[in-house]
Amino acid sequence: MQMHPSRMIVATGDASNTPSVHIWNIITLEPYKVLKTNHQNGILHISFSNDGDFLVTVGFEQFFSIEVRNWHTEEVIAFRNTDELPILDVKFNSYDKYEFVSCGYRNICCWKIEGRSLVRKEWIHVRETQRENDPIFTCTAYLDYIVGKQVQSDVIVGNNFGDIGLVTNGKYHVIK
């Protein structure tokens, strides 16, 4: 479930062979809209862009597909399969609705929407050398700060070891 930035609606995804996203009015508890997706087997994660126009969903199939749409018009902006590594969270950049991050088993990926394509801007594959098991990144967010007159955004992630990690300039740093 994901709450819209307006705090007036929420989106939920169902688990079925042809899953849909359900948009709900939280005041009346009535369905507002049902959006058919291109996913299969269910929807794992949902995130709204900060302006509330875009909705990104992650499908629960072998290659964990990602779909971005303008939920108002129901237009699918971009769709692609990723790979066999599970995606456990997805978040839009706070200042750029054409950019979002996903994370999961041993990987963190920054995506850019270019036209109708989803392009991997950065893909960080992490192997843990000091532990027996590799990290599973379970949650992510953007860390925004001002440098001069520009807003910079780095990615922070949490993992199954309880660590916080920072992704900056294409590199992953563990902060304990």
Image: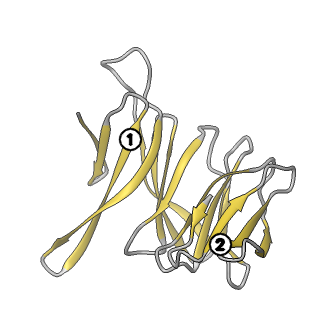
Determine whether 152 is above or below 122 in the image.
below
Quick one: quadrant of the C terminus? Answer: top left
Residue 35 point in image, percent of width and height? 78, 71
Classify mark 2: residues with Cα within 10 Å, few (<14), some (14-19) or many (20+). some
- In the foreground, 77 or 33: 33
| Left or right: 31 as drawn, with respect to 6 | right
Determine whether 45 is above or below 6 in the image.
above
Instruction: Give me the residue at 77% from left, 76% from top.
Output: 33
Quick one: quadrant of the N terminus? Answer: bottom right
Q: Amino acid at mark 1?
A: Gly
- Seen as rendered, the residue at the extreme front is 28
Residue 134 point in image, percent of width and height? 44, 25
To which residue does mark 1 refer? 158
For label 1, the SS is strand
Which mark is on residue 26? Answer: 2
- In the foreground, 47 or 59: 47
Residue 46 point in image, percent of width and height? 61, 59
- In the foreground, 1 or 128: 1
| Left or right: 13 as drawn, with respect to 155 | right
Determine whether 5 is above or below 80 in the image.
below
